[in-house]
Amino acid sequence: MKPTPPKIKRIERNPIFQKAISIPGSKSYANRALILAALSKDPCHIKGLPKALDTLDLIACLKRIGLQIHEGKDGLTIDRSFPSCETPSKTPIRLDSGEGGTTNRFLIPLLALGQNEYLLYPDPQVMKRPMDEFQRHIKSFEKKNDHFRIKGPQSSHSLKLGRSPTTQIASAFSLVGYDVQIPPSLPSLPYFLMTQEMVRLFDKEFCVPPDWSSAAFPLAFAALAGSVQIENIKAQDPLQADSALLGVLDQVGCDYEWNSKGLHIKKALKRPFVFDCTHSPDLFPALSFLASYLDGESSITGLQNLKYKESDRLEEGIKLLSIFGIPYHLEGHTLRILGQKPDQRARSVTTAKDHRLVMTAYLFLRLNGGGTLEPAHAVEKSFPEFFDLMGSS
C-alpha cells in the first residue's frame, strides 16, 4: 500500500511545467456507480475506480452492510444486492463514512431501504452540511451531534425537493429509485443530469471516466507555465460540470487541441476571463489561482454555495489570495481578481483541511518561491496521486 503523504510537505519553486500525465477516475461517477451496483440484482464489474478516500470509504461501508465486493487488477466486482444482502442485527450497525459529501448523502437513502438500524459516523465537517431534505423525506432519519441514524424499511416514491443547496441530495434519492422533482434554480445541475443518465444507462460493466475536477489543476498551471498532455481525456464531458474549464482556457487564449494522445494545452496569452461558478463550484480554487497571474482583472461569479464544501471555500480561497499578495474585490457573489507577476518569496502556507485548497496552494507555492504546505495529506480525499503527477517536469 502506498504511504499517505506527510502532513507538511516542502514545495520547491519550479515555474516550468511540461509533462504527459493521466488523471484519476472521477469520484462523482465512481460513487454513483457503486450505489447502482449495490442495488443491481446481477453482479457488476466497475473499472477505473479512483483511489480517492471518498470512494474507498464508500466501498468499506458497502462491505459492512453485507455486499460481497471482490477487488482485482482489472477492477472491482460487486455481488449480491441491497437490501436482500442484509444480515438481521438486533443492535445498530455503525458505519464510519469519512468526509465525502457523496459518500454520506448517497448512503442515507440507500440504508433507508434496509431492515437494520444504521448509525452513520462521518467527519465532523459533514455534520455542518445541509441535510434538511433527508429529514423531510425519510421518516426514520435523525441527525445527532456526531452521527446520523437511519432505519428502514422505506420504499422509494415520488418526491419534490425544496431549495436544496446541493444536487447531491437530489442524486442520492434518484439513485435508489425515487422519482425526484427538483427546483428549477438548483445549482450544480450537471451533476444531477449525470445521475439521471447513469440511472438510465447503467449496466453490469462500467468504466469510470477521468476526472475533470482533478484535471483543472494541471491545466490551470500549464496555462501559465508551459504545457501538459492529459493522455486519458479524449473529449469534453458535458456531464462533468468542470469540463467547462475549456471555455475559460479559450478566453485566456490557451492553445489546446485534441490529438491521438488525448488533450494537449500550451501556455496561454494571459487574457483575463469571466466565469460563473453556479454549476461548477469545484472549479473556483483552480480558477482563483489562474486569475491571479493573468494580465488584467478576471471576474468569478456564482459563489453562493462555496461555504457548503469541505471548508468555506470562498473565505479560505480569499485567504490564499492575501497570503500571495493578490489584489481582489468581493462584492456579493462576485470576486474580481487583478493579476500580478509571480514573486520568488518562500512562504509557509497552512490551509483548511480541504483537498482542493491544498492543491491550489501547491500551485501558488510552485509558481512563486516555494515553501511548506500543510495539511498536504488532504489530497487523499480526491487525488492521492497529485504530488507525484505534478512533480518535477
Image: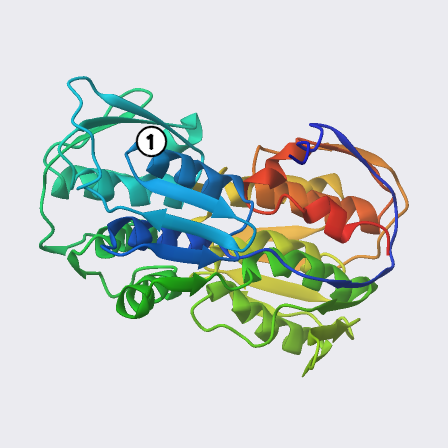
Query: Quick check: can you spot residue 287?
Result: no
Choose top left, top right, bottom left or bottom right for residue 226.
Answer: bottom right
Sort mark 1 into few (<14), some (14-19) or many (20+) by Cα contacts within 10 Å.
Answer: some
Q: Secondary structure at mark 1?
A: helix
Q: How is the image coloured?
A: rainbow
Q: 317 or 23: nearer the eye?
A: 23
- Residue located beneath label 1 in the image: 64
Q: Amino acid at mark 1?
A: Arg
Q: Which residue is farthest top?
A: 91
Residue at 33 percent of width and 21 percent of height: 146
Residue 311 is left or right of residue 148, and the answer is right
Task: Look at the image and tell me in which quarter the C terminus lies.
Answer: bottom right
Residue 55 is left or right of residue 2, and the answer is left
Residue at 12 percent of width and 55 percent of height: 159
> How far across and how far down the image is residue 186, in percent?
30, 60
In the rendered image of this protein, does residue 264 appear above or below residue 134?
below
Query: Quick check: can you spot residue 249?
Result: yes
> How far across and how far down the image is residue 202, in percent?
32, 65
Residue at 80 percent of width and 71 percent of height: 267
Choose top left, top right, bottom left or bottom right for residue 179.
Answer: bottom left
> How far across and how far down the image is residue 280, in percent?
47, 61
Q: 87 or 393: nearer the eye?
A: 87
> How far across and how far down the image is residue 346, in percent?
87, 37
Choose top left, top right, bottom left or bottom right for residue 246.
Answer: bottom right
